């Protein structure tokens, strides 16, 4: 997975190449991305709840990233399928309760929910991951290699 470091201010001002960060094709739109400071796994040693709390209060910033319509459409389709499967999972679980087949409804609903989670993961894998790092920069992961080279060239002196 190719990564590139970009300044937050450049993304906010749209002062980056007009290329889709995922595909390298010309960008037709800007898509908001939330960059989050990663929480150290050491927090997990204190328990899952403290780790979730630390993750919830970690620094976050929303910036726009250039994207091609093709990439955005694929992301929306995958996300829609995931949401549809999650809705179906709830409906199947509820139907199981209504028809007194709680175990069947619960197992089928959880299976659909699992598939929904996998689909959502695939949707996210089809986009860039943004990590807030020190110095007012964002590390973008999953960037097209040609775009990464262009960004590295631009920030060589940074």
Image (cartoon, grey):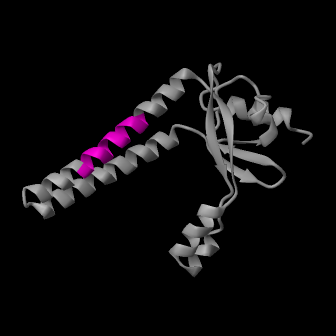
Residue at the front extreme?
98
Identified at 60% across, 28% down, the residue is: 23
Identified at 81% across, 39% down, the residue is: 9
| Image-based side of 62 in relation to 79, left or right | right
Within the image, what quadrant is residue 77 found in? Answer: top left
| Image-based side of 123 in relation to 40, left or right | left
Identified at 85% across, 32% down, the residue is: 154
Is residue 46 located in the magenta-colored stretch of the structure? Answer: no
102, above or below 64, in the image? below
| Image-based side of 50 in relation to 138, left or right | left
Residue at the right extreme?
157
In which quadrant will I find the C terminus?
top right
Identified at 32% across, 40% down, the residue is: 84
Within the image, what quadrant is residue 17 found in? Answer: top right
Camera sees residue 1? no
26, above or below 75, in the image? above
In which quadrant will I find the N terminus?
top right
- Residue 48 percent across, percent down from the top left: 51, 74
Which one is in front, 154 or 43?
Answer: 43
17, above or below 143, in the image? above
Number of numbered discs on residues: 0
Q: Which residues are magenta?
A: 78-90
95, above or below 14, in the image? below
Q: Main secondary structure of the magenta part?
A: helix
């Amino acid at each position: 997975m190719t990564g590139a470091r970009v300044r937050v201010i450049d993304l906010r001002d749209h002062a980056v190449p007009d290329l889709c960060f995922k595909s390298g094709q010309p960008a037709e739109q800007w898509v908001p991305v939330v960059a989050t400071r990663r929480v150290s796994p050491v927090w997990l040693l204190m328990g899952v709840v403290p780790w979730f709390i630390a993750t919830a209060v970690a620094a976050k910033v929303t910036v726009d990233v250039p994207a091609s319509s093709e990439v955005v459409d694929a992301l929306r389709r995958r996300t829609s399928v995931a949401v549809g499967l999650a809705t179906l999972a709830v409906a199947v679980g509820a139907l199981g309760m209504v028809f007194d087949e709680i175990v069947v409804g619960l197992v089928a609903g959880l299976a659909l929910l699992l598939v929904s989670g996998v689909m959502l993961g695939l949707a996210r894998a089809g986009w860039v991951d943004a990590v807030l790092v020190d110095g007012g920069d964002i590390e973008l992961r999953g960037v097209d290699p040609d775009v990464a080279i262009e960004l590295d060239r631009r920030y060589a002196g940074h």
